[in-house]
Image (spheres, coloured by chain):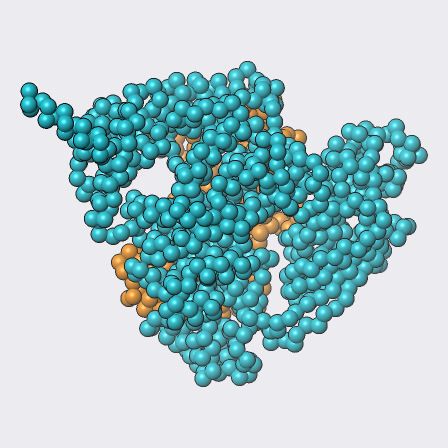
Chain colours: A orange, B cyan
């Protein structure tokens, strides 16, 4: 289970989205639920924008409402069907089927929340709509940070993540492939290139922090920034680089 | 005196019968093992000084088994340590083997048990496809499902497969879509003919509303010739759309279509030198037919939101020729023609020509043109290098021979929507559940779903929608999602499911179910294996088993760096996977001995892969059998898929490759490194080679123990780069040193010598492959309690002197396969 999903369990139920998970291309496989299921990132800023701020037309909402209602009845039937099957199983297999019943309950819980959110209007952000078009990854990183800030600001969610992994197109910074240079093998040329990528990523983080400060939510937000490896060349995960920011830590400690 | 004499005689008798004793074993362990696995040190977490003489626990059974295995392999005691005499070793082995056998017999359960498991994403996809007659190669209902947990590379481990709310929501969506796709109350669509001749680009009013791909720009122009030339791999100037189908939003009906293209290859041999460094001079022109979906696409990527490659063919002739394929097009998709191995992009090509080949006479009149479009168009028109020339594209279809299709029949029978009501629907549900559950429903399993439908009808829901909701519920119910194999020895019905999921990754067909119902499947297994392997569905076994066994998904998760231009331009990933699949199928279909996997002196290549391997004389895009004779390739160890999957896409590591070969081919998983050793830091500056670094690593005693088993296997393969190409030196010019010594003492000076040593370990390979096959077949890890039956299976196989197909038959007849 990953940190964001653990946090979402505590603070996620109050908002439209328990968590928002974004990333460039396929991200880094960072987010996992308690049950051990991978949560893939949203990789298109336009999709995220629509989800956060664009209300569906009424007729679409009506169709969704009907679907939700039917789904509730189907879940009831599935639970009863599973229980009938359960009676024919041994203990080990019953435990296995229990996972299915837990999943049914899980979906039911979400369903109960859904109709309410379906008809409650989404907040209107003070930015232009983000259109569906092809973008540089460099711009996507900036847009995702902006959208995360807006999502937190409008209380659409209280947990947000961004993953930049091997799919990040470093050619946009006039560099060789990210994966290629990460196996730097101590050559200076590659290490210099890595510095360019890392400078870019930390600059964007810094912009994000400024945004949260402007919105006056920085002190109420905890930011964790880091990498799953300290040195990708030796695949070492010792002495991981981690930045912890926000949360009013300093005042609380002193 | 008399006393002493008796003792001497007794010892003599012992050694003659060559059977050890508990006492001798205990002395043996103290003398040869306890130094590393005793009270003071416990290397690899193994301690033998306290092993009880009587085997009462599974843990003890496992320890003793390990000891016997290590002694058999000759890997312990390690080289340099005091060695037992061969007789002593043999006596201990014989004694312990018998002891293990009787211990196993005394344990209650003869072997391990699998758990109730759900279908994994792969099986779900095939099952839904077969059940509803849908083409799931094109539409993957499980595309967005969360990735499965893998155990030892296998993704069907019942104990580890997770079911979650997230997954259940995906099941709902997939089931709804599948039912929609299978439903065909409309008239059977008639086959139509569509054609488009040059030009393929349009201007003015004609072009209104068309995606960029259909409009001219700097790298696409409307030609005044009866053909259109394609210049690069990128869509600008490299892809051709097909307007007749685009105008109607792609094909209206999923099905088989005939696609014809009249085309030729121009300028394959050129003298543009460096300007065309991304095209291999003299290569054929590779034409690709792709199916693309332009709905919801982003404009600037050539308006494609998803695509599938349908076919590729190599063109060498300058005269136009018709090429034809029968391919499946999913509704909403339309064909596109592409120059698959062209220079990277027409844009780059123009730039390169104007910088690196500006002295060519054909470009002289263009050098001073200001207008960028006119200049780029002019350069492309004057250019004499490799081009794919297309005259005309035609599409015919859909060709449908079964309407409304299997899925529609299974859901609705022969009923029309107006014939559906509270009386007819329950019969349909009953029949559908029978197919979906692969068995009759248990008591109370189907009733809640029938009740759901009646409730919905009373609420006023349309009968058609109520039936569809019921079918959706069935496809999300545990009866469909879980492989329920009952208890203990498999029933005939459960056996049918296990067999069909092994060989077809999908439910048993009517023949299997009928045999099971008559109680005759168990007696007919060998014939059924033969019949099932002859069915094209068995390709799923070959494809998916290899993918799991050899971890071929590594290639996708750590894709080769863009520096490996040939990997992408020449479509090597597909060819590599196909090579190993064809090789596996060849061994299987011809029932060849397993020694082919290590020693075969042939493989299956197309031109592109053969060129990658440095083999000349292979032409065309189809893979075919090629004899090998240069000592570099042969068996799995020379195949690109294995060599790429065991690297990281950028460089190779002997440690990673070594572990890979140990795990996949020799069935041994080394323990993880202790937490306190420094990592190996790759250094490619040229001063220190990886070998020198590893020598240093092995100076640390805790590292040496495992690395002496791991590293040599990796070093032997260092002549292969990260995508399996041959190399004699590293990038920094340090020569490759592929020598080494295997644990047990055999040393090798070259790859081919190493291969010979691997061939000597054929038994170990056979055991490893058998274990992998059984793991895949049963959906669980094999344990120590399976060892007896596994040994018996291997002995029976060895005695049969048979091939891979015989092994499969023996496996499905084994007690491990036939028990839950």
Q: Residue furthest right?
A: B365
Q: Is residue B96 left or right of residue B596?
A: left
Please tell me which residue is depicted at 81% across the width and 59% down the height of the picture. B196
Q: Is residue B24 left or right of residue A11?
A: left
Please tell me which residue is depicted at 22% across the width and 45% down the height of the picture. B102
Residue B374 lies in quadrant: top right
Q: Measuring from the top left, give residue B775's x and y in whole percent.
A: 39, 48
Q: In the figure, B82 relative to B425: above or below?
A: above
Residue B349 visible: yes
Q: Measuring from the top left, give residue B39's x and y in whole percent.
A: 20, 26
Q: Residue B412 versus residue B582: which sits nearer the camera? A: B582
User: The C terminus of chain A appears in which quarter of the rendering?
Assistant: top left
Q: Residue furthest left?
A: B2
Q: Measuring from the top left, give residue B135's x and y in whole percent.
A: 58, 61
Please tell me which residue is depicted at 27% across the width and 28% down the height of the picture. B87
Q: Measuring from the top left, give residue B123's x and y in whole percent.
A: 47, 57
User: The N terminus of chain A appears in which quarter of the rendering?
Assistant: top left
Residue A146 lies in quadrant: top right
Q: Is residue B265 left or right of residue B698?
A: right
Residue A39 visible: no
Q: Is residue B315 left or right of residue B424?
A: right
Q: Residue B355 versus residue B382: which sits nearer the camera? A: B382
Q: Residue furthest top?
A: B687
Q: In the figure, B271 relative to B285: above or below?
A: above
């Amino acid at each position: 289970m990953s940190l964001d999903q653990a946090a979402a369990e505590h603070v996620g139920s109050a908002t439209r989205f328990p968590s928002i998970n974004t990333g460039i291309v396929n991200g880094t496989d960072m987010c996992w639920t308690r049950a051990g299921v991978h949560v893939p990132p949203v990789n298109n800023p336009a999709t995220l924008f629509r989800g956060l701020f664009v209300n569906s037309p009424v007729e679409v909402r009506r169709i969704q409402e009907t679907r939700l209602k039917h789904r509730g009845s189907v879940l009831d039937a599935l639970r009863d069907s599973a229980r009938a099957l359960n009676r024919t199983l041994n203990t080990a297999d019953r435990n296995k089927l229990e996972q299915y019943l837990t999943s049914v309950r899980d979906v039911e819980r979400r369903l109960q929340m859904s109709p309410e959110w379906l008809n409650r209007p989404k907040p209107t952000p003070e930015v232009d709509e983000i259109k569906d078009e092809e973008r540089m990854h460099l711009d996507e990183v900036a847009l995702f940070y902006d959208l995360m800030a807006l999502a937190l600001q409008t209380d659409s969610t209280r947990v947000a993540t961004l993953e930049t992994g091997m799919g990040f197109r470093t050619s946009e910074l006039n560099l060789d492939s990210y994966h290629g240079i990460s196996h730097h093998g101590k050559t200076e040329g590659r290490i210099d290139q890595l510095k360019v990528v890392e400078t870019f990523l930390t600059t964007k983080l810094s912009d994000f922090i400024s945004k949260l400060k402007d919105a006056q939510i920085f002190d109420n937000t905890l930011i964790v920034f880091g990498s799953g490896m300290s040195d990708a060349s030796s695949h070492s995960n010792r002495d991981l680089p981690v930045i912890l920011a926000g949360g009013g830590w300093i005042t609380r400690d002193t | 005196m008399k006393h002493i004499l008796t003792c001497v005689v007794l010892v003599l008798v012992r050694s003659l019968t060559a059977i050890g004793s508990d006492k001798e074993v205990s002395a043996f362990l103290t003398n040869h093992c306890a130094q590393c696995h005793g009270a003071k040190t416990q290397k690899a977490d193994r301690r033998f000084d306290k092993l009880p003489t009587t085997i009462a626990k599974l843990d003890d059974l496992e320890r003793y088994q390990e000891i016997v295995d290590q002694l058999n392999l000759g890997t312990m005691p390690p080289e340099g340590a005091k060695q037992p005499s061969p007789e002593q070793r043999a006596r201990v082995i014989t004694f312990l083997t018998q002891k293990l056998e009787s211990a196993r017999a005394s344990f209650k359960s003869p072997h391990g048990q699998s758990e109730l498991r759900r279908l994994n994403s792969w099986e779900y996809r095939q099952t839904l496809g077969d059940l509803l007659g849908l083409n799931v190669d094109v539409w993957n209902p499980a595309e967005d499902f969360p990735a499965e947990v893998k155990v030892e590379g296998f993704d069907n481990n019942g104990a580890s497969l997770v079911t979650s709310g997230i997954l259940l929501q995906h099941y709902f969506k997939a089931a709804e879509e599948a039912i929609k796709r299978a439903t065909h109350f409309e008239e059977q669509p008639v086959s139509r003919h569509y054609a488009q001749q040059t030009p393929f680009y349009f201007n003015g009013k004609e072009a209104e509303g068309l995606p960029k791909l259909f409009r001219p720009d700097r790298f696409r122009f409307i030609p005044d010739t009866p053909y259109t030339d394609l210049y690069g791999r990128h869509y600008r100037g490299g892809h051709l759309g097909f307007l007749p189908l685009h105008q109607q939003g792609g094909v209206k009906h999923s099905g088989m279509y005939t696609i014809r293209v009249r085309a030729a290859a121009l300028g394959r041999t050129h003298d543009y030198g460096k300007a065309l460094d991304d095209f291999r001079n003299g290569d054929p022109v590779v034409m690709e037919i792709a199916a693309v979906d332009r709905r919801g696409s982003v404009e600037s990527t050539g308006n494609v939101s998803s695509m599938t490659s349908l076919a590729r063919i190599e063109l060498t002739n300058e005269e136009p020729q018709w090429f034809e394929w029968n391919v499946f097009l999913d509704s909403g998709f339309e064909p596109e023609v592409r120059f698959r191995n062209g220079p990277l992009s027409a844009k780059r090509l123009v730039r390169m020509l104007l910088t690196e080949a500006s002295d060519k006479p054909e470009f002289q009149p263009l050098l001073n043109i200001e207008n960028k479009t006119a200049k780029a168009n002019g350069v492309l028109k004057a250019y004499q290098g490799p081009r794919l020339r297309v005259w005309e594209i035609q599409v015919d279809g859909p060709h449908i021979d079964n309407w409304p299709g299997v899925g529609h029949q299974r859901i609705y029978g022969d009923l029309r929507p107006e014939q559906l009501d509270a009386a007819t629907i329950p019969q349909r549900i009953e029949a559908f559940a029978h197919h979906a559950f692969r068995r009759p429903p248990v008591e109370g399993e189907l009733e809640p779903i029938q009740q759901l439908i009646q409730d919905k009808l009373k609420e006023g829901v349309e009968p058609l929608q109520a039936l569809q909701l019921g079918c959706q519920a069935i496809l999300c119910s545990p009866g469909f999602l879980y492989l329920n194999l009952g208890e203990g020895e498999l029933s005939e019905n459960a056996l049918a499911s296990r067999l069909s999921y092994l060989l077809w990754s999908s439910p048993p067909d009517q023949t299997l179910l009928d045999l099971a119902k008559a109680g005759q499947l168990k007696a007919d297994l060998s014939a059924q294996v033969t019949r099932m392997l002859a069915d094209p569905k068995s390709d799923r076994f070959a494809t998916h088993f290899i993918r799991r066994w050899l971890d071929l998904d590594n290639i996708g998760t750590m894709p080769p760096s863009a520096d490996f231009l040939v990997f992408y331009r020449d479509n090597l990933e597909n060819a590599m996977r196909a090579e190993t699949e064809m090789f596996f199928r060849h061994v299987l279909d011809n029932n060849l001995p397993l020694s082919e996997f290590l020693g075969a002196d042939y493989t299956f290549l197309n031109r592109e892969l053969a060129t990658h391997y440095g083999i000349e004389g292979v032409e065309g895009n189809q893979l075919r059998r090629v004899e090998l004779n240069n000592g570099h390739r042969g068996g799995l160890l020379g195949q690109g898929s294995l060599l790429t999957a065991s690297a990281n896409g950028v460089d190779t590591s002997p440690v990673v490759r070594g572990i890979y070969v140990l795990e996949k081919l020799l069935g041994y998983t080394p323990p993880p490194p202790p937490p306190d050793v420094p990592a190996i830091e790759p250094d490619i500056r040229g001063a220190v080679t990886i070998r020198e670094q590893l020598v240093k690593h092995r100076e640390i005693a805790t590292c040496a123990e495992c690395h002496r088993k791991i590293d040599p296997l990796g070093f032997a393969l260092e002549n292969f780069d990260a995508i399996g190409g041959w190399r004699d030196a590293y990038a920094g010019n340090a020569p490759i040193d592929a020598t080494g010594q295997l644990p047990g003492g055999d040393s090798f000076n070259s790859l081919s010598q190493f291969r010979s040593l691997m061939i000597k370990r054929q038994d170990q390979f056979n055991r490893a492959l058998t274990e992998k096959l059984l793991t895949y077949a049963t959906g669980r890890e094999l344990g120590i309690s399976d060892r007896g039956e596994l040994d018996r299976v291997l002995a029976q196989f060895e005695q049969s002197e048979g091939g891979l197909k015989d092994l499969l038959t023996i496996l499905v007849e084994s007690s491990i396969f036939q028990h839950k």
